[in-house]
Amino acid sequence: MGILDRVNPFNQFIEVIEWLDDSSNTMLYRFPVKDQEIKNGAKLTVRESQAAVFVFQGQVADVFGPGLYTIDGGNTPILSKIGAWKYGFNSPFKSEVYFVNTKQFTDLKWGTMNPVMMRDADFGMVRLRAFGIYTMRVSDPRTFIKEVAGTNAHFETEDIEGQLKRSLVSGFTDALGEAKIPALDLAASYDELGKIARDKLREEFATFGIELTKFFVENISLPPEVEAAMDKRTSMGVLGDAQRYAQFQAADAMRDAAQNPSGGAGLGAGLGAGFAVGGAMANAMGSAMNPQQQHQQNTQGGAATGSATVKCPKCGAANAGSPKFCNDCGAKMETAAATVPCVKCGAELREGAKFCGECGSKQEKPKCPGCQAEVSPGTKFCNECGTKIETAE
């Protein structure tokens, strides 16, 4: 605050005009001069990060930077600019003195009150919210007083934050739309977005005599439903093989059922749950088989169940009963009616039959007595060693 030093009782005083700022958000302070009268020879102290503005008859007369000044006709430009002195240099003159704080005001908050609409390549139309901080300083005290502070005796950052926040959100929205960055890549582009928005807003802030020195984007968030979809996609990526995960869950469920301490009906319910879980696990393991294992199981399924099966002419899979199409590959089963003669009586048998339906003989191909190689029925000499083959009786 200002200090008035009185050195004699005849009202011939030397005024000390200064401002000691004990706040963190004051941008402008009007020095309380009694009747706006300043004595010739008054001392003006302007500290670092301050500027003193003299306003005479409603106009800015001069601006003083950091330093110590004496108000007289020798070294103060204000005297030549004010001009008319009613009482000369030995009498007081009327002027308003404003101290402008030119330091940087830091940690000022900004954020989007309403979501920002954005077209995204992955999610389509999305609504984004963002917030962060910014830093500003008064760069032109003359413009600041003329355009913003006016005749206010005390001006704080809160008095202009609303206007600045709206300008910041508008500039950030333009920067976000022009950048065309996918929503999944925004986290890696906060610095770039901050620089683009700051460059866009410099001219707007300059109209108030203010410089936007820093602009930071702390977070850009997606709507809850989009974040939930992203979490699911991330979870699936972490799990990897969903079928193996299903097996693991089924095994855990069986373990929990086995550890169930309930007795009586609880025990029966636990056993029933165990059987159900076991069936679910078997289905999960069956679905997890690779195609080769599944094909082998289908091929050998007839022997396991004991029912009549027919091989598919295309893939060889065993099909129970007499289906028209293969249960494994979908090929028609009509071409599977290939027949072979009985090795003893020559009756037509289904290919792959182990016994003859006419004579009951076992369908094994005769072997060469010399090299034991299999030979076709009716062959007289071995194709491998040339030994004569005796006709089977």
Image (cartoon, helix red, strand yellow):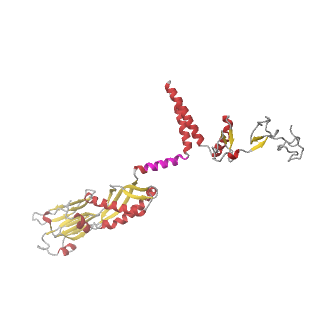
Residue 262, visible in the rendered structure: no
Q: Is residue 341 left or right of residue 259?
A: right
Residue 214 placement, left or right of 383 = left
Q: Residue furthest left?
A: 10
Left/right of residue 286 with respect to residue 29 in the rendered view: right
Q: Is residue 251 magenta?
A: no
Q: Where is residue 327, by image quadrant?
A: top right
Kindly report the secondary structure that dominates the magenta region of the rendered protein: helix
Residue 234 sits inside the magenta stretch: yes
In this rendered view, identify the residue nearer to me: 288 or 155: 288
Q: Nearer the viewer, residue 172 or 392?
A: 392
Camera-nearest residue between 387 and 102: 387
Residue 356 lies, in percent from the top left, at 77, 37
Q: Image quarter for residue 246?
A: top right
Q: Residue 163: image x %, image y %?
A: 28, 60
Judged from this view, the residue extending furthest toward the top is 264
Residue at the (37%, 57%) spot, across then down: 116
**Residue 23 place in picture, x, y as percent:** 26, 56
Rendered view: 262 above or below 316 = above
Q: What quarter of the picture does the C terminus occupy?
A: top right
Q: Which residues are magenta?
A: 227-240
Horizontal placement of 316 versus 176: left or right? right
Quick one: 262 or 97, which is closer to the camera?
262
The N terminus, quarter of image = bottom left
The mark total stands at 0
Q: Residue at x 39, y 64 (%)?
A: 196
Can residue 54 be seen by looking at this rendering? yes
Residue 368 at x, y percent in the picture = 86, 42
